[in-house]
Structures are given as C-alpha cells and as structure tokens.
C-alpha cells in the first residue's frame, strides 16, 4: 500500500513524528510515496491509498483542501489538543498499520461542500469540510440576513451571523454556537444562527442535496470557510453553499467508534460527578 504523510513543519513534534512514522510504514511493509510538511503541494495527482495526517483537526482540514477533488482516505494522528477527527495517538497509529496493510478497515465518507460568491464571478467555488460562516465584520454591528433554500425564501435572521455546517463540522464552531451534534455520515447540513436577536432563532437540519444561499440585507459581513477568511460580504452580497461532488474519506478501524470519540473527547453522555453522600446511621 502507498501512503502519504502530511502535516505542518512549524508545529512542535511534527517533523520528528513524520520521520518515525515513515520508518514504521516501511517496517510494516508499506510504501511512503510523499512526505509533505510544507503544505504547498497539490495532492490531487499523487497516487496513494491512505494519507497519514500529523497534527490536529486543523491539519486534516488543510489536507482535505490540498487533496481537492481526489480525496485519499485519511487517518489522523493527534499531536494537537483535542483531535476530534485526528483521534489516533502516535502509538495507536503505528499499532494499526498492520491492520491497514491487511485491508482490515473501512472508509467512512462524509459530506463536503462548495462555497461560492454569485456576485463575484471571478471567484471560483471553494471546497470545504466543516462550515461556511457569514459573520459580522467591522464595525461589528448586528447583521440582517436572509436564508434561501433552492431559491425559496426561508427566513430572516438578526444577530452576529449565520453558518451552514456539515455533519463533520457540527462538533466544531456550530456546536459552540448552540447547534446539534449530527452523526458524521448523515447526508445533511445544519444551519446555525450566531447570537440570534430573538428566541425564535433556532438551528435547522436539512438535506445536503439542496443549495443554501445567505444574503446580507443590512450590515457589513465577512465569509469564513473552515477558519479561513474568504473576504468581505457587504450589504446586498450573497454566498451559496452546496454539496460537493466529492466526499471526505476517513479511515475507520475496529475498536474506534464515533460515539466513543464523543464520550472521550467532548464528554458527551457522561454522568455528572456526584458528590459522595455518607451513609446515614
């Protein structure tokens, strides 16, 4: 099997871990076809079976953008803080290499999106994995936004912004804004208001096979895709979000489940730490 090793050279421990991981792949009988720690290589034409991504979830988002419309299955090796997508430690990744080389794994496919600016025809659609955020920009006044789904007016929102998130992104920015957790393999988007001005502003889950358009009725906004600023969106501006023709592919090995990750990383569904009550008597 052919492996990519990806990461950010500027991050602590990544260069050393990349060398050790390359040696482990060779020792297990695999082939490393490319090590890219400078994040400048177009990966869409690199023949590989699995990409080993060193770092945190940000490194995986970057790798997904680099791979473009030829997504290689990713196994994330967590060298960062939380590591929700990168949920293997370095030692766990090395231990599961023989399992991968025996093809004892499955590949989970996750919705990606294309984000475009209809009023800027010179700007190509941008591929993303987590979310598109339309948020207030300078001078940071409340935005008046409208949402269309497949060309039909759905609602207006007053507040700090609005985001359209994939199931993978539902445990990121959307979750911190009060959005629901979506099972990662659902074909859906979640629309989450940011600091809505009314109590009726609530998240909405809808099908992925629709086109979502956010328009700025009043205010100065900016568009952020997976944490990367795409630029300003003034009054009258619009942004569209639709399902990409390619899916993000994540390696799943036996013993690692999505619900286990929710419990271990986000403490979802865990019992409160009750104070011990002494026995009466």
Image (spheres, rainbow, N blue to C red):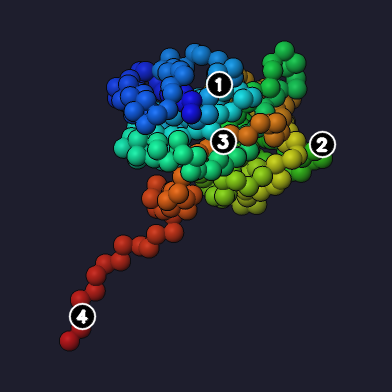
- Tell me which label, 4 or 2, sits earlier in the chain: 2
The earlier-in-sequence mark between 2 and 1 is 1
Residue 279 - label: 4
- Assign a secondary structure to mark 4: loop
Contact? badges 4 and 2 (CB < 8 Å): no
State the separation of the CA atoms marked 3 and 4.
Answer: 53 Å
Name the residue that disc number 1 marks: 47
| Residue shown at 70% from the left, 31% from the top | 245
Q: CA distance from mark 1 to mark 4?
A: 65 Å
Q: Residue 162 versus residue 250: which sits nearer the camera?
A: 250
Question: Where is mark 3, residue-wise?
Answer: 249
Q: Position of residue 91 (x, y in %)?
A: 31, 37
Q: Give the mark nearer the N terminus: 3 vs 4.
A: 3
Figure quadrant of residue 197 = top right
Q: Where's the C terminus, which quadrant?
A: bottom left
Q: Is residue 186 left or right of residue 6?
A: right
Q: Nearer the viewer, residue 182 or 77?
A: 77
| Residue 138 horizontal/vertical position (percent) | 55, 23
**Nearer-N-terminus badge (3/1):** 1
- Which residue is disc 2 drawn over? 151
Q: Is residue 156 visible?
A: no
Q: Counting residues from the N terminus, which is met first, the one under dot 3 or under dot 2?
A: 2
């Amino acid at each position: 099997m052919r492996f990519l090793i990806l990461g950010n050279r500027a991050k602590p421990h990544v260069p050393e871990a990349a060398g050790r991981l390359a040696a482990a792949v060779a020792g297990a009988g695999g082939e490393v076809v490319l090590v890219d720690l400078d994040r400048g290589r177009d990966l869409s034409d690199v023949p590989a079976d699995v990409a080993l991504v060193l770092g945190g979830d940000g490194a995986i988002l970057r790798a997904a953008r680099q791979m473009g419309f030829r997504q290689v299955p990713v196994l994330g090796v967590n060298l960062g803080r939380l590591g929700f997508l990168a949920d293997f430690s370095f030692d766990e990744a090395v231990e599961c290499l023989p399992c991968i080389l025996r093809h004892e794994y499955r590949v989970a496919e996750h919705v990606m999106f294309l984000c475009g600016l209809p009023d800027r025809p010179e700007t190509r659609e941008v591929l993303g994995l987590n979310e598109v955020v339309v948020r207030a920009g300078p001078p940071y006044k409340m935005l008046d936004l409208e949402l269309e789904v497949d060309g039909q007016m759905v609602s207006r929102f007053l507040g700090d912004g609005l985001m359209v998130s994939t199931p993978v992104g539902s445990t990121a920015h959307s979750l911190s804004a009060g959005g629901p957790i979506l099972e990662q393999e659902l074909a859906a988007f979640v629309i989450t208001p940011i600091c809505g001005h009314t109590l009726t502003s609530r998240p909405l889950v809808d099908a992925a096979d629709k086109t979502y358009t956010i328009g700025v009725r009043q205010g100065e906004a900016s568009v952020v895709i997976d944490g990367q600023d795409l630029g300003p969106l003034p009054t009258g501006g619009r942004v569209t979000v639709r399902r990409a023709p390619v899916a993000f592919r994540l390696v799943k090995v036996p013993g690692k489940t999505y619900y286990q990750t929710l419990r271990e990383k986000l403490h979802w569904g865990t019992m409160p730490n009750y104070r011990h009550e002494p026995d009466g008597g």
